Amino acid sequence: MELNKAVREIMTDTVIQVQVDTKLSEVVEIMSSKKIRHIPVSKGNQLIGIVSRTDINRLTFGALMDNQSSADEAILEMLSLEQVMSGNLRVVKDTDTIKTVAEIFASEEFHALPVVDASDEWQCVGIVTTTDIIKHLLQ
């Protein structure tokens, strides 16, 4: 296990991203159909935030109660992605080490971080999750 490898070695580089004007119901559908928990949010070509399944679950009742899908739909229609996403964005560069990312996960409340190009900090080139770190440690 090499902790000094660049994070680009273990990140997911086929990142599904959404634009800031994407409807929340579409984001939920993407998360469900692709079985993902975090989606970077862009405005044009610029990374501006990230939305997680936890962000969505905080708004909806479906995970807690049966027969609440109509209430969930109403909530998702009332709010915009920009209102729900985390806009105070923390990113890592594709050249940062796996150790650096693991230290961030251990000391802060993140479970996923967008990975940006070292030469263009607005360009998302991947995403790294706690699961990626754990899989690497188990190799």
Image (cartoon, grey):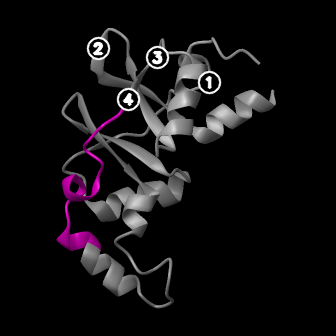
Q: Secondary structure at mark 2?
A: strand
Quadrant where the N terminus sits is: top right
Name the residue beneath numbered marker 4.
91
Mark 4 / mark 1, whichever is N-terminal = 1
Mark 3 / mark 1, whichever is N-terminal = 1
Q: Nearer the viewer, residue 130 or 70?
A: 130
Name the quadrant containing residue 90: top left
Q: Gap between marks 2 and 1, in whole Å?
A: 20 Å
- Above or below, comparing residue 2 to residue 12 in the picture: above
Q: Determine the residue positioned at 26% across, 80% down.
A: 74
Mark 2 / mark 1, whichever is N-terminal = 1
Camera sees residue 117: yes
Question: x, y (%) of residue 95?
Answer: 48, 11
Mark 3 / mark 2, whichever is N-terminal = 3
- Above or below, comparing residue 55 to residue 131 in the picture: below
Name the residue beneath numbered marker 2.
120
Quadrant where the C terminus sits is: top right
* Range drawn in magenta: 76-90
Marking on residue 10: 1
Q: Secondary structure at mark 1?
A: loop
Q: Determine the residue positioned at 42% across, 68% down.
A: 57
Q: Amino acid at mark 2?
A: Asp
Q: Gap between marks 4 and 1, in whole Å?
A: 15 Å
Name the residue beneath numbered marker 3.
94
Q: Determine the residue positioned at 51% across, 26% down.
A: 13
Mark 4 / mark 2, whichever is N-terminal = 4
Q: Is residue 112 left or right of residue 70?
A: right
